[in-house]
Amino acid sequence: MSTSLTSLERRNFFSALWHGAFLALGTALTQPATVVAAFVADLTGSTIWVGGLATVLTLAGALPQLFVARWVEPRPYKMPYLMLAIYLRVASWGALAGLTYAIGASRPRLLAWALVGLLAIFYAGGGLGGVPYTDIIGKVIPQARRGAFFGGRQALAGPLAVGAALLVQRVLADMAYPTNYALLFGLAALSLLVASLGFWLIREPPRADADGKVPSWRVYREQLLRSAYRLRTLIGVQFLTGFSLMVLPFYVVYARQELGAPPGAIGWFVLAQVLGGALANLIWARLVDRDGSRRMLSVCATISTLTPLLAIGLARLGWAGLLPVIFLGGATFNGRNVGFSSALLELAPAAERPTYAALNAVLILPVAFLSLVAGVLLQYWSYPTLFFIAMVFIGMGALLTRRLPDPGDSRNL
């Protein structure tokens, strides 16, 4: 890499990796599919709450993005908006840590609603930050190195995330509630604060043709329609394979409620998910840079199709039987991040990256409702039935990946 990147490009590359590594550390401490799902289940005892929270968080992250993209896209620099989003997220985790410690034992239902509100702010900050982040990464990471970046970001985060997973296991097993969860949320806020240092070091080049003029909604609507047409196949793949995200939080709930997993098992599930993601990242990066995002997404979706089937078969071994399932869930979850991020940048014209990023987030919003639907269906159906249905839809998404365009060729869309 040192022979093909300038000194400024190397600085930007490794600064962005720094941010990604510590962001992953904070995420590992508060995995939505493990730590937060278990926390919500402990607070409410309801699968509807688990699924509903996942839906609220996705909506909070996606809905603001089109408004942000329309306003931010004409600006020459996007970094100030990204930094605002980062510190909004730091504040929300910090506030949640304080509230959990203060009222976690005495007011669980009030804390559950506070959790919804503060995590909605956290994910709204992610929505605000996702738009400028995509544009900045598109500017500072050369196209030939994007697979290496998206995979390397997660691979560099691996040791930190594994350490975080081990810490989660010890904290949840050895510390009393609510101090254990309060500590994890506070450490997540600290990790995001450290992660922000990476973007302080990045030198964002300005958009050369930026005039700062925000287009009217009539003009912008026409741009959105053109962009949506180009994205339609990618959106279809994301929706169908998104059924893997629907069931991911419920593997842990299934282990807790049906298979007798103790509280300390959550840490092992976090470790399995983190290890799966970390070990698979180099494979995903290699596939993207060598064969393109279409091939990589096809492999990832095929593995994702088999994962719910494994959950059905391995449950007879008890809660430990789900560890390989969550390992593969972590691998394919990170694979989605690498593959879809790369595919989106391949499709988006440089001047329209914020719009493409925002529109992509909005068009896949139906995925947000899948976890809520799953939570409701589990009031009447068994977990294995839900896992089987998810497998069918994910398999359809795996087939649809064959219709994605070759790298750099958007004419097939």
Image (tube, rainbow, N blue to C red):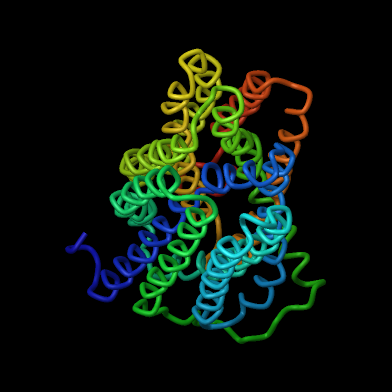
Q: Is residue 183 above or below residue 71?
A: above
- Nearest the camera: 166 or 370? 166
Q: Is residue 317 visible?
A: yes
Q: Is residue 297 above or below residue 188?
A: above
- Nearest the camera: 189 or 181? 181
Q: Look at 60% across and 44% down and name the residue there.
A: 234
Residue 3 placement (x, y as % from top left):
17, 63
Q: Look at 37% across and 62% down and name the residue there.
A: 22
Q: Look at 64% across and 46% down and name the residue there.
A: 40
- Nearest the camera: 359 or 99? 99
Q: Is residue 148 visible?
A: no
Q: How many marks?
A: 0
Q: Is residue 232 left or right of residue 273?
A: right
Residue 147 placement (x, y as % from top left):
37, 51
Q: Look at 47% across and 82% down and name the residue there.
A: 206
Q: What is the residue that sits farthest to the left in this orientation?
A: 3
Task: Pick the quarter of the image with the N terminus.
Answer: bottom left
Task: Pick the quarter of the image with the C terminus.
Answer: top right
